[in-house]
Image: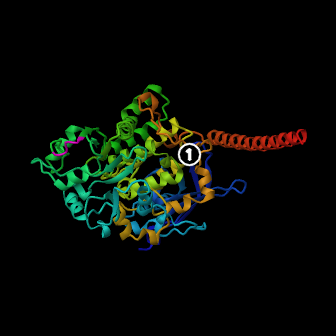
């Protein structure tokens, strides 16, 4: 298919661009296969706007006489307005945008056409392989092994080809366990706590059904992660009621009679359309220009967004407490084990493991616990808060995770190597990107699409020095301790950097950030001078002592 066939009017002149907190600009609008490009005609202050079609969530058009207006609402939550002279041009451009922003075939998306303008120093597709993670693990314990049972994705389509499992469990036993777990997602290692040797595993629900079906191999695998005489905790991210209802559909939970050394805890984390509705209500509240305090607070509360943040953080803290304070191993699962499970396992690691608070450590976490673990990004991030089409599998699961990370970052501002901009960048690229990293729903789909051969990895771009500098936290000081975030409602805030980003002027925030960086840089220079002066003073004092005592 040729993109030119979909573009009825490739160019329009005398178009006026309107954005909040910016003066209206007149210029030329161009449509390409993947971008909407607006360039101003002003010589004194020429500016360009490049917008990926895949970033467009909805496109609304209206007319006053022959003047047409297109309102474009984006997945990154910004809203822009284009005034286009001529009804026909406006209709053509709007229909082209609607088609180009909803292409069915993944291989027609921009990552398959993008060619980097920078020198590629690192192949991001090979930056975080399971073998590298296993090397770190095997340096502290020999109780686990790499299993290639899922080579060719033959056992579990949503798992990577290589997984880490207990050494005493054979591949034949793993196959039997896979048949006993929803979507064949058998328990695999998620995290090893070096401090006390406790571990966290993740999986999907067991298929116990109404008859209380059991699987001896499953019981053996889970018990293999326990130390002698120790108990473990199964954290089910569904309420007890939801878990019991799942039994009627063939799912269920681990019966304590068959898992006597494990205590089951139910924590109800919402999913799917409830989360999507929550995001839609929150963004609607943030865009409300009525300036009525009661209305704002009631809309914010009605969205339930911060309630979801609190539920997820509370469950992650519980998992971390079981491991660090109780000295117990943990298994986390919900129904499929691809959404709330991953929110909990990844946040627990941020709380427990200082490596996950570094830039590369956090990237590795996103790869391990989200991309390789089978979070269906293509489905979940197909729409954002503005789309008019009926929701199917969309849910802001990854955005909620990033929001939770931001809450912890705000409470421990010196303990993270990355800044808020790093999290915002990941949110943007999960929904629309020139890179192939977040395409597909699992590693199996990415392999079929040949993404590592045909697209560029986000990490190849991010990990270049000139980009990294934008995402580094200037007040970072490595903290080797476990950090315990406060999860009381009073401790949680609306993430203004995402949800109010386009609804407030950013100039003063950027100036304040630049000033802070300058002060920190000047402070480091002064500290270096103090070190030099102290060294010189010590040398002079030593010389004086030699002269005094020849």
Q: Please give the count of numbered marks on the rendered protein.
A: 1
Question: To which quarter of the image does residue 441 belong?
Answer: bottom left
Helix, strand or loop status at disc 1: loop
**Residue at the image point whose x is 54% and y is 56% from the top:** 85
Residue sitting farthest toward the top: 294
Q: In the image, residue 371 lies at what x, y percent?
A: 39, 57
Residue 203 makes an appearance in the image: yes
Residue 396 makes an appearance in the image: no
Nearer to the camera, 191 or 40: 191
Q: In the image, residue 276 lies at what x, y percent?
A: 35, 45
**Residue at the image point whose x is 19% and y is 60% from the top:** 176
Magenta-drawn stretch contains 184: no
- Magenta-tinted stretch: 258-262
Q: Does residue 17 appear left or right of residue 392 in this picture?
A: right
**Residue at the image point whose x is 53% and y is 55% from the top:** 84
Q: In the image, residue 137 lies at what x, y percent?
A: 41, 56
Magenta-drawn stretch contains 261: yes
Q: How is the image coloured?
A: rainbow
Question: To which quarter of the image does residue 436 belong?
Answer: bottom left
Residue highlighted by disc 1: 419
């Amino acid at each position: 298919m040729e993109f030119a066939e979909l573009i009825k009017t490739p160019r329009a002149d005398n178009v006026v661009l309107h954005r909040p907190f910016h003066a209206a600009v007149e210029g030329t609008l161009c449509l390409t296969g993947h971008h909407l490009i607006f360039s101003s005609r002003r010589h004194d202050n020429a500016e360009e706007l490049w917008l990926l079609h895949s970033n467009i969530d909805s496109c609304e058009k209206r007319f006053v006489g022959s003047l047409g207006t297109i309102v474009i609402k984006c997945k990154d939550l910004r809203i822009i307005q284009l005034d286009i002279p001529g009804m026909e041009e406006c209709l053509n451009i709007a229909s082209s945008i609607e088609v180009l922003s909803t292409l069915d075939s993944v291989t027609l998306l921009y990552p398959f056409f993008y060619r980097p303008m920078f020198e590629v120093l690192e192949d991001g597709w090979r930056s975080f392989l399971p073998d590298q993670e296993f090397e770190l693990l095997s340096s502290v314990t020999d109780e686990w092994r790499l299993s290639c049972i899922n080579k060719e994705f033959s056992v579990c389509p949503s798992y990577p080809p290589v997984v880490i499992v207990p050494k005493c469990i054979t591949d034949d036993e793993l196959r039997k366990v896979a048949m006993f777990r929803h979507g064949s997602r058998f328990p695999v290692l998620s995290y090893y706590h070096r401090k006390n040797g406790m571990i966290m595993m993740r999986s999907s629900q067991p298929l116990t059904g109404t008859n209380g079906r059991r699987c001896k191999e499953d019981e053996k695998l889970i018990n293999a992660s326990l130390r002698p005489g120790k108990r473990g905790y199964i954290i089910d991210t569904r309420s007890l009621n939801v878990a019991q209802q799942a039994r009627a559909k063939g799912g269920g939970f681990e019966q304590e009679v068959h898992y006597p050394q494990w205590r089951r805890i139910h924590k109800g984390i919402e999913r799917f359309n409830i989360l999507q509705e929550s995001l839609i209500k929150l963004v609607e509240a943030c865009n409300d220009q009525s300036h009525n305090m009661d209305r704002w607070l009631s809309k914010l509360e009605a969205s339930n967004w911060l309630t979801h943040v609190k539920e997820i953080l509370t469950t992650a803290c519980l998992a971390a407490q079981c491991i660090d304070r109780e000295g117990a191993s943990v298994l986390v699962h919900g129904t499929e084990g691809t959404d709330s499970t991953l929110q909990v396992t990844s946040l627990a690691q941020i709380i427990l493991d200082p490596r996950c608070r570094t830039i590369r450590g956090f990237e590795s976490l996103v790869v391990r616990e989200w991309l390789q673990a089978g979070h269906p990004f293509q489905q979940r991030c197909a729409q954002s808060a503005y789309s008019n089409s009926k929701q199917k599998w969309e849910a802001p699961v990854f955005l909620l995770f990033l929001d939770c990370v931001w809450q912890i970052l705000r409470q421990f501002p010196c303990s993270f190597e990355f800044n808020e901009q790093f999290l915002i960048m990941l949110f943007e690229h999960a929904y629309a990107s020139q890179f192939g990293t977040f395409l597909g729903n699992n590693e199996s789909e990415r392999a079929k699409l040949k993404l590592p051969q045909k697209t560029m990895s986000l990490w190849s771009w991010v990990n270049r020095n000139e980009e990294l500098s934008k995402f580094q936290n200037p007040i970072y000081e490595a903290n080797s301790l476990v950090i315990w975030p406060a999860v009381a409602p009073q401790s949680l805030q609306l993430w203004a950097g995402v949800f109010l980003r386009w609804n407030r002027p950013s100039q003063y925030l950027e100036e304040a950030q630049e000033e802070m960086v300058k002060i920190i840089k000047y402070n480091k220079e002064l500290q270096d001078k103090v070190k030099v002066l102290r060294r010189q003073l010590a040398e002079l004092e030593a010389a004086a002592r030699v002269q005094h005592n020849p």
